[in-house]
Structure formats: structure tokens, C-alpha cells
Image (cartoon, grey):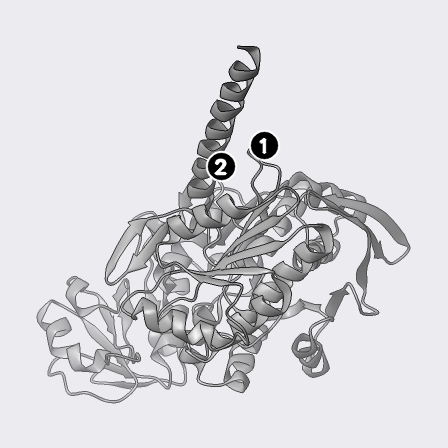
Amino acid sequence: MDDSVPAVRVSLRRLLPEAAIYHSDDIEVTSCASDSRGVQPGDLFVALVGHECDGHEFVDEAVFRGASALLVERYVAAPGVPVCVVPDSRAAQGQICQALAGRPSERLKVIAVTGTSGKTSAVCLTTSVLEAGGRNVGWIDSFGAFDGEIATPAGEFSLQPASLAAWLARMAANGCTHAVIEVSSQDLARSLLSGVEVDVACVTNVRPKHLEVHNSSQSYREVKSRIFRHLRPGGAAVLNLDDPICAGYLEKMNGPALCVGLLSNADVTAGIVERTASEQTLLVSAGCDALPLRTRTVGDLHATCALIAAAVGLLEGIDAATAVRGIERIEWIAGRMERLDCGQPFHVFVDSADSADGLCGALETLREVVDGRLICVFGAKGSRDRGIRPLMGQAVEAIADLAIVTDDDPGEDEPSRIAADILRGFESLEQVVVMHDRAKAIGWALAHAEPGDCVLIAGKGHEASQLVGRQRYWFDDREVARQLLHDRAKSLGALTESFRRLRAG
């Protein structure tokens, strides 16, 4: 546990009444660990079952290092050490960590956001709405975390049950009234929210993704729906009614729900008044209120996330006008349809879209607002479901005019095989360029863009690294593109000056 979290003593008999405890009447816990290599004397060792290893195989090492008790899913012999057997050690670990931290979610209003895409945007916008309404807000998303006093970048911590409990405890201790948390499907599958009481559970959308982890679309949908299990009594859901799976969740909800949508008859809805490459104006309707909303980020996904943020604000007693003001404070969100303007005569956008659905959404938005050609630089991540790669190629061919297939995060997958999988989705390769070096691919796209064209650099968004083999290297699409655009401007400036001198001489 983090040193900043005050130590308390937790009775497993009281906390986990369904557990079977051996070699002791009760087990009192003051700290826990799930990595046998990091066990300290007196820790409870939690044996987790993962895809690649089983913590039960490391019980002997944990005991040797001083574990005072074991939490397991199946009984293991450990002479002299109490054993607690539970159906799900991950869920039990979450409950223990939250209890050791003093159950901080009882002292906070917790808003949890999940979905296939738009989670980070929804967290950023919701945080801004709550702050506009005078709330003190802590947050955790793919950018990092803020405990009410200090912001920490995502790369400097790993979100595990103990660290989540520590973050929430610090938020409560620092005077935060609300915590807004981004929760992925992987987080829900590993019971990260176990022990956390959620006041508002938001779902942006649910599309096929991460099937290499969840095995099937049905399993993925079920995992996403687990977020509702953590709602405290009286807690509410915020659902995107335009998404059919979200609409399906609504039919199974036992508690209150507020629905949003651009196309549906929702509680909070909006119409697109105007959309250009640099901004969009919506008319937001909620009850008797109808208010204009201007955002610098364009696209239906951003508009939906704005409606989710407004809906959370309404549930928290914030009026619609204040919610709109909070949303408009966020001029851009890193790597989410982020527009790069370095004086070039064409448009450049960087977006995190790394699936067929995400690419369709981004490209359709840009097709709506640009008159020239649409050029897309994209690739597929390694170690992901290979079946999505042809679909990505199919999506790009259907909307873009020119495709540059490049490396994303190939990892230990062979880049040429990833590219070949993507190319299977194209009916014709006449307007396709394969260029594995991502910087060169971006440079090629920018060099071939003409006035009025639009270049979309998709897949990595705000990420500032690239995984090749087992090595992670610095790489930021935005910085690479900006540098190339500045170099292009300098070259054009020098060429213009040369022509000027020739005419003058």
C-alpha cells in the first residue's frame, strides 16, 4: 500500500463473509501484495489467476518472504499460515484494498466512465463541468491522475487495486468532493472497481474491440455491463441511446438512468447547427432548456461525450448553462481529433482511432468538413485480434482518397504481416502506400497534401512512444508532424525568397 494511506486493520471474516478460512478463526490484514517477489513480512499474499501465470504457484515464495496469510481461490497447504479461500481473489483483493484505505469512495461522489471510445474525452469534459459547478474534482484517465493537489502522468504509475484505493484516499484527504474515473474493459474484467461505490456509471458506446482479451463480442458486452454492479443504492447510469448496445443496457437497468443522444429521443440531446474543420456548434436540449454549445473539437463522438458530461452535471445539480460553460472551457483534448495548425494550406488531424469503427467515425467527420482529398496514415497494433486489421483497411478505403499503411505499435508481431492483414481489406491497392517507418509515412503524407486536402494521422493519439519488439521508443505523432510542417514552411519560405530575389535581380 502507498505510505500516504493510513494503515488500518481489516477482518477478512467480516469483510468477506462468503470466504472459508482455515487454520484460524479470523485473519486480520494490515497490508497485502499480489506479486510474490514484492511480499513484505506481515503482508497478506493474494494469489491471482491470470492468462499467463497462476499466483497459486508462488505461494511458497510468498510464505518464505514473510506472508502472514494467504488469499486464494483454491486451498493450498501452507503449514503455520492461515488460508482464506474465496470464489474470486481479484474481487476480494479490491475490497481489501479499499477497506485498508478507509473506504474512500464513501467520502466522494464517484463517476465512472467506460466505453469502447470516448472515455478520456468524457472524463475531461465531465471534470470541467463539475469544476464549473464549483465542485473539487480528482480524476484518473489515460493521461494520468490528479488527487486534488498533484497531477501525475500515466506512465509514472500502474492502476492496480491498491493504487486506485490510494488515489481515492488522497482525493478525499485533499478535499475533493468528486472523483471521475476512466475504466476500461480490461479494468472491469480484473475487478478493479471492486469495493468502490459508484454514484454515476457512464457508457459512451460499446463496439467490437479487444476480442483477443474477451474472446467474443458477447463477452465484451457483458464485461462492459459490469460497471453497473458497482452503483451504490440510488446511483444512476448515463447511457448513449444512439448506441444499440447501450440502449439494450437501458432495458435491463433496475435503477435510474439518464440517456443522451444526437439521433435519438433522449433526455439530453443535441442538433448539429454548424460544423467546420476548426469548430462545431450544437443546440443542446435538456428538459425545457435549449442552449448553443460551441466546441473546437469536431465530430459526433466529441458531441456525444459533451452530452454525457452535461448529463452528469444535471444529475449533480448543475444547471445546463453552467454545464455548457464547463464544456466550452475545454478547447482541445490531446490526440482526440486534435487539429494541428502550423500555417499549412491543408488540414492535419491527429486522432487515437485504432479500430475500424473509430476510423469510420473520424474519417466521416472529416469528409463532411473538407473539400479536398482525405489522406489517412494508419496502422494496427500488434498482439491484437488479427481479424480487425482487414476491417480497418476496408473502412479507410471506403472513405479516404489515399491510404498510407504504416507501423503503429507492432510489438513482437512482424510489421509486414500486420500490413498484409490490413491490405486484405482493400479491394484495390492503387491508392495505397505501405511505409513501415512511421515518421517517413507522416512526412510522405504531408509532402503530398495539396491546398484544401486533409491528413488524418490515426492510431496513437496522445501517446508519446512506439513499441517495436520489446523496446519502447519515443514517438509522438503530433510533435513529429509539427516538426515536419515547420520544416516544410521553412523550405517553402526559402524557395519563395529565392524566387523573389530572381525577379528583383
Q: Which mark is residue 485?
A: 2
Q: x, y percentage for residue 316? A: 70, 54
Report the amino acid beneath label 2: Leu
**Is residue 230 in view?**
no
Residue type highlighted by circle 1:
Gly
Foreground: 356 or 344? 344
The foreground one among 79 and 207 is 207
Find numbered disc 2 in the image and state the secondary structure of the residue it sits on: helix
Quarter of the image for residue 89 reads bottom left
Q: Which mark is residue 31?
A: none
- Mark 2, other Cα within 10 Å: few <14 / some 14–19 / many ≥20: many
The percent coordinates of residue 4 (x first, y second) are 34, 47
Q: Which percent across, then down, holds residue 501?
A: 52, 14
Q: Is residue 209 above or below residue 166?
A: below
* Residue found 61% across the figure and 55% down from its top: 374
User: Relative to residue 350, is residue 341 depicted above or below?
Assistant: above
Spatial CA distance of label 2 from label 1 is: 8 Å
Q: Residue furthest right?
A: 288
> In the rendered image, which quarter contains the N terminus?
bottom left
Residue 248 drawn above or below residue 125: below
Q: Is residue 35 left or right of residue 115?
A: left
Tell me: residue 265, above or below residue 123. below
Rendered residue at 31%/58% (across/down): 467
- Name the foreground residue: 236 vs 107: 236
Would you name the residue on which mark 1 appears?
343
